[in-house]
Image (cartoon, rainbow, N blue to C red):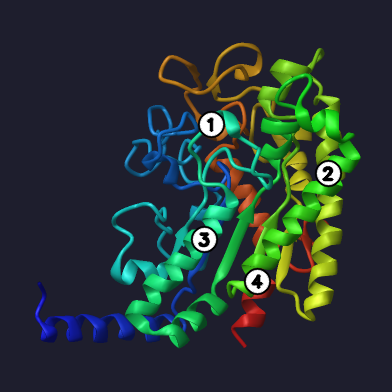
């Protein structure tokens, strides 16, 4: 058992670290969502929704799989780099203790959606309700070290990223030719429903202290290699999933504008992931890619069948491909997305980009 003197010294150091963090050092960063932003929580779960085997992580600094659904860095990593901070650790990582808690935490879990019945085929994943409960638990852990007031300050000043929605279509509505949700809703009504549920999630984040929340819409669901392999007859983006993205994203922006108006402040910022990715999907050569149709890692048409494994086809240069596997962008595509999040016009970011937010918050 540590001595009282050691415990006191540790607490003084930790509080000193916190004070430093609030005086110009990187703000805390919290991440919620699905496989686009999961940093490895699913490594600790018994589930098929994992990226903990090669060739995942082939271009990560360690050249080893980390649980990220990427060849290298994912979107949260790249945002952390832009903030001048170290990457957030997965909440389930045993190393997330002490002063590492002050960096923030990644609560995301591959396979989840807005709805609890999304991703049931993956069994043991951390649904968004549980991610929010883990955020409460995180705050209790930090409060035990710093006290409630300083913990609230850390959370209020933090940047939050949440990415949800894609799986509610891919792994729910469209998962089988006749799904329960398809029988219940047409595509428009299903989209309205999940947006209404998303609103409740965002309000819960607000109630838990989040005051700067970056909300990314779904990507171009009909254009990912998986959709091209399973739904396209001529290599064009699959019509129905693409229509889902075209419905979901404007509804998301409208909901966020309404929420901000209700709260009287620009708490939530919408990132138009469809337009960001459509730019390099429509003209990959303009962004230095040789293809936006074929995944770097996979098998079958467009390398879009199944999942990426050690037995899959693997491209020699990941920087030339927009998609890493049948569903997820490469690190280089993620860099383009993150650059647009920071500097993009109102075509991509509503009501403002992240650089503008950072400038406002530094005043």
Q: Earlier in the sequence, mark 3 or mark 2?
A: 3
Residue 63 appears at what percent x and percent y? 34, 37
Between 303 and 38, the one nearer to me in the picture: 38
Secondary structure under the numbered disc 2 in the rendered image = helix
- Callout 2: 10 Å neighbours few (<14), some, many (20+)? many
Residue 151 in sight in this render: yes
Q: Is residue 317 left or right of residue 242?
A: left
Residue 283 in sight in this render: no
Above or below 252: residue 247: above
Which residue corresponds to mark 2?
191
Q: Are marks 3 and 4 in contact (CB under 8 Å)?
A: no
Residue 251 appears at what percent x and percent y? 86, 53
Residue 10 appears at what percent x and percent y? 21, 80
Q: Earlier in the sequence, mark 1 or mark 2?
A: 1
Which residue corresponds to mark 1?
122
Q: Earlier in the sequence, mark 4 or mark 2?
A: 2
Above or below 153: residue 32: above
Q: Is residue 196 left or right of residue 133?
A: right
Residue 110 appears at what percent x and percent y? 53, 40
Residue shown at 45% from the left, 48% from the top: 39
Q: Which mark is residue 133?
A: 3
- Callout 3: 10 Å neighbours few (<14), some, many (20+)? some
Q: Is residue 43 left or right of residue 109?
A: left
Q: Earlier in the sequence, mark 1 or mark 4?
A: 1
Q: Are marks 1 and 4 in contact (CB under 8 Å)?
A: no
């Amino acid at each position: 058992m540590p001595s009282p003197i050691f415990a006191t010294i540790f607490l003084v150091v930790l509080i000193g670290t916190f004070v430093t963090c609030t005086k110009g050092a990187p703000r805390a960063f919290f991440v919620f969502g699905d496989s686009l932003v999961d940093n490895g929580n699913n490594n600790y779960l018994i589930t098929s929704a994992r990226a903990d085997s090669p060739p995942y992580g082939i271009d990560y600094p360690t050249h080893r799989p980390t649980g990220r659904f990427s060849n290298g860095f994912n979107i949260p990593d790249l945002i952390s780099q832009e903030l001048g901070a170290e990457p957030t650790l997965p909440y389930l990582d045993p190393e997330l203790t002490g002063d590492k808690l002050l960096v923030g935490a990644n609560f995301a879990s591959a396979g989840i959606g807005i709805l609890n019945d999304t991703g049931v085929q993956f069994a043991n994943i951390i649904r968004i309700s549980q991610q929010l409960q883990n955020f409460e638990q995180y705050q209790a852990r930090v409060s035990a070290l710093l006290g409630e007031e300083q913990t609230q300050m850390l959370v209020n000043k933090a940047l939050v990223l949440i990415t949800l929605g894609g799986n509610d279509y891919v792994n729910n509505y469209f998962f089988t030719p006749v799904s329960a949700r398809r029988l219940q809703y047409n595509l428009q009504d299903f989209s309205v429903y999940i947006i209404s549920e998303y609103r409740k999630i965002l309000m819960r984040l607000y109630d838990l202290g989040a005051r700067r929340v970056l909300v990314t819409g779904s990507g171009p669901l009909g254009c990912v290699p998986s959709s091209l392999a399973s739904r396209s007859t001529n290599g064009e983006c699959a019509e129905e999933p693409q229509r889902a993205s075209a419905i979901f994203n404007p509804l998301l922006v409208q909901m966020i504008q309404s929420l901000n108006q209700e709260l009287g402040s620009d708490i939530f910022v919408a990132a138009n992931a469809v337009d960001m990715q459509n730019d390099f999907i429509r003209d990959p050569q303009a962004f230095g890619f040789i293809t936006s149709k074929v995944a770097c890692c996979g098998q079958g048409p467009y390398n879009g069948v199944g999942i990426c494994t050690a037995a899959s086809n693997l491209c020699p240069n990941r920087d030339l491909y927009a998609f890493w596997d049948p569903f997820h962008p490469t690190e280089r595509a993620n860099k383009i997305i993150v650059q647009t999040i920071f500097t993009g016009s109102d075509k991509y970011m509503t009501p403002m980009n992240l650089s503008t937010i950072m400038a406002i918050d530094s005043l």
